[in-house]
Image (spheres, grey):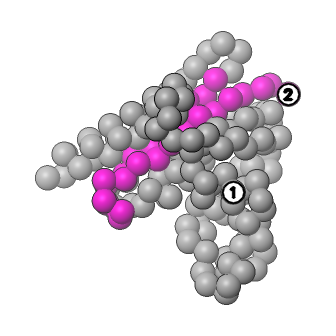
Amino acid sequence: MKKVEIFTDGACQGNPGPGGWGAILRYNGHEKEISGGNLHTTNNRMELCAVIEALNLLKEPCEVTLCSDSKYVCDAISKGWAKSWQQKGWKKSNNSLALNSDLWEELLLLIEKHNLKVVWIKGHAGHPENERCDQLAVAAATKLKTSNL
């Protein structure tokens, strides 16, 4: 299996508001940067979109190390919360609805294809790839915001 590193981040200007996501994929010494956004969204949706869009680029099953500063994404994957929400009809342990079930559904299908290791990294702490993903996400959100003024 190919070993791929993925770094992701999401940003939102207002929550909800214009949002952006950024990701870096690294394989065999090569890097690819991607970004995008949505005019009316939340930070957590952008965090999820970054991971989904990055995994969608992989053409075959890979060993993936996912690095994110989102506790929401990292914990929901690594602690099995998202799978549990799915099994309970997108309800959390307190019986409230799990948010972003559409994106979680898509992400869980993508995760099944790969051997995924999740690494939480502290945001805005000088981690070069996280800082770059933040720049990509903020730029995408800003572009949406300014083009719709």
Q: Residues in magenta?
A: 1-26
Q: Is residue 93 left or right of residue 124?
A: right
Q: Which residue is mark 2?
A: 1
Assign a secondary structure to mark 2: loop
- Determine if residue 122 is in view: yes
Residues packed near mark 1 inside 10 Å, few (<14), some (14 to 19) or many (20 plus) = some
Q: Is residue 139 left or right of residue 86?
A: left
Q: Position of residue 72 (x, y in %)?
A: 60, 58
The residue under the point 69% across, 57% down is 75
The residue lying toward the viewer, choosing from 55 and 71, is: 71
> Does residue 4 show up magenta in the picture?
yes
Q: CA distance from mark 1 to mark 2?
A: 25 Å
Q: Amino acid at mark 1?
A: Asp
Mark 1 vs mark 2: give the one in front: 1
The residue under the point 62% across, 15% down is 30
Quarter of the view holding residue 94: bottom right
The residue under the point 72% across, 28% down is 4
Q: Is residue 44 left or right of residue 120?
A: left
**Are dots 1 and 2 in contact, CB under 8 Å?**
no
- Majority secondary structure of the magenta segment? strand
Q: Which residue is mark 1?
A: 75
Q: Amino acid at mark 2?
A: Met
